Image (cartoon, rainbow, N blue to C red):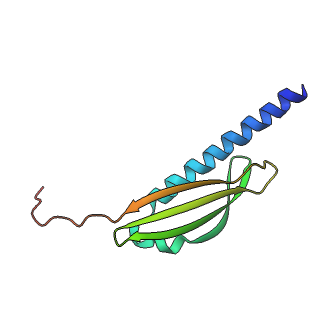
Amino acid sequence: MFQVARHTRTSAVVGYRSAAVTSAADWARGLRWDSIDGVVGCSADSAGLMAYTRCTTVQTLTSQSKEISVVISPTGQLVTSPETVIVYRTAPRPASPFYVN
């Protein structure tokens, strides 16, 4: 019974951590290009029963590309190792004056 309970808890932690990482990646992909540099820092968040701290850094690779790194560090009762997700973003292309709908 003890091992079943331990495996169930481990499975829950993995599921919540996966949800947090997926949410962080979707959040980073959805940022407007001109607001990316303003998201640097840490904030508290949660995924289901798992509370965590989300720390974001941004590195400018070129004038047209940036790397957003998000570290998910669980802080509540469901504790596991931190997880990092990296999202590469490129600047939107300007609209072509030659394209006609």
Residue 43 position (above or below residue 52):
below
Q: Position of residue 65 (x, y in %)?
A: 38, 66
Q: In this rendering, would 88 be left or right of 20?
A: left
What is the total number of numbered labels drawn onto the structure image?
A: 0
| Residue beneath the point at 56% across and 72% down | 40
In the picture as drawn, the residue positioned furthest to the top comes out as: 1
The N terminus, quarter of image: top right
| Residue beneath the point at 10% across and 58% down | 100
Q: In this rendering, would 9 be left or right of 18?
A: right
Residue 44 position by quadrant: bottom right
Residue 11 position (above or below residue 36):
above
The C terminus, quarter of image: bottom left
Q: Nearer the viewer, residue 30 or 73?
A: 73
| Residue beneath the point at 78% across and 50% down | 79
Residue 39 position (above or below residue 5):
below
Residue 47 position (above or below residue 100):
above
Q: Position of residue 85 (x, y in %)?
A: 56, 54
Q: In this rendering, would 93 be left or right of 33?
A: left
Q: Position of residue 26 (x, y in %)?
A: 50, 52
Q: Position of residue 30 (x, y in %)?
A: 45, 58
In the picture as drawn, the residue positioned furthest to the right comes out as: 2
Q: Nearer the viewer, residue 21 or 51?
A: 21
